[in-house]
Amino acid sequence: MADLKVEERGPVLVLTMDRPETRNAMSLAMAEEVAAAVTMLDDRPDLAVGVITGANGTFCAGMDLRQFAAGERPFVEGRGFAGLVEQPPRKPLVAAVEGYALAGGFEIVLACDLVVASREATFGLPEVKRGLTAAGGGLLRLQQRVPYHLAMELVLTGRMFPATEAADVRLVNRVAEPGTALDVAVALALEIAANAPMALAASKQVLRRSVDWPLEEEFDCQEAWLGPVRRSADAKEGALAFVERRAPQWTGS
C-alpha cells in the first residue's frame, strides 16, 4: 500500500501523507513518492497547483526516527528531505495542516508557498531535544518567515508553536476550522489555478530567488524569468480576454 495518496481535483494535485501508525512520519519510501508526485506536478501542463496534507488529523511528525536509528534517511537525491525541501516544485505548493507539523513536518510546511492550518494545529522544530538539528531547511527558512528573535526562540527551545500564534506573524495564510484545512487549501489552490500558469511559475521563482540578487542587477535577473511570460501566447490571451470581457483560456505557452 502506498504511503502517499495522490488525487487530482481539476488543476490541483493533492498529496496526502498516510502513515497513521507513525503520525505520518517521513520514510524513505514516502519521500520517493513525494518526489515523484511533485515532478509530475511540474511536468503536467494541466496541473497548476499542488496541495500537501496529512491523513488522520495529523500533518507530519517529522522523520521516522526508528528508521533513522536503523540507518535509513528519507532523503531523495536532488530533492532532499521528504523528496521536497531542497527542490520544491516550480509550481505553487500549499500546505494544509491539521494536528502536528513537527520537525521535518514543519520543514515541509516551510518549503511550501502558502499555508492553511486548522486553528488547533501545532508547529515546532524540537530537534535540539533529540540531539539533532533542523537540517531539512528549518534553520534556513524559518528566519525568513518569522521575526529573527522568534525564530531563534523556536529553534533553541524546541517549543510548540500553535497555529493561532503562527497566524499572528503571518506564517499561516488561512486559519481553518478543525477538519477543514484541506478543503480551505484546495479552494485557495483553485483560486490560484485560475491564473496563467506561466505567470504563476515565473512569479514564484522571482520571489524565491531575488532575496540575494545584487541591487543593481535585480531587474536584469528577473527578466530571465519574466521576459518569456511577457512574450507568451497567454499574455496576449489575457489582454484579449480583458478587452472582450470574458474568462481567459490559458494554454501555458
Image (cartoon, helix red, strand yellow):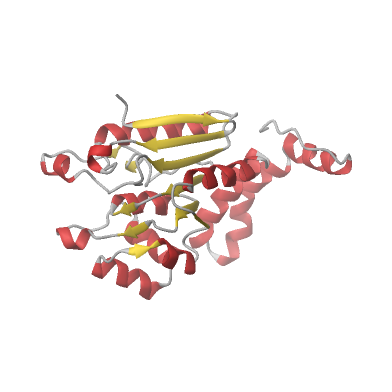
Left or right for 31, reference 116: left
Left or right for 184, reference 23: right
Nearest the camera: 117 or 91? 117
> For the image shown, how many numbered marks are present on the structure?
0
Residue 36 appears in the rendering: no
Image point (24%, 70%), residue name:
157
**Vertical position of residue 43 compared to residue 240: above or below:** above
Provide residue 70's location: percent of width, then percent of height: 11, 39
Image point (48%, 41%), residue name:
51
Image point (31%, 68%), residue name:
154
**Extreme-top residue of the structure:** 1
Provide residue 239's location: percent of width, then percent of height: 82, 43
Nearest the camera: 176 or 7? 176
**Vertical position of residue 86 compared to residue 119: above or below:** above
**Extreme-front residue of the structure:** 178
Among the 4 quarters of the image, the one containing residue 229: top right
**Extreme-right residue of the structure:** 244
Left or right for 187, reference 167: right
Task: Point out the image quarter for the N terminus.
Answer: top left
Provide residue 71's location: percent of width, then percent of height: 13, 39
Provide residue 116's location: percent of width, then percent of height: 49, 52
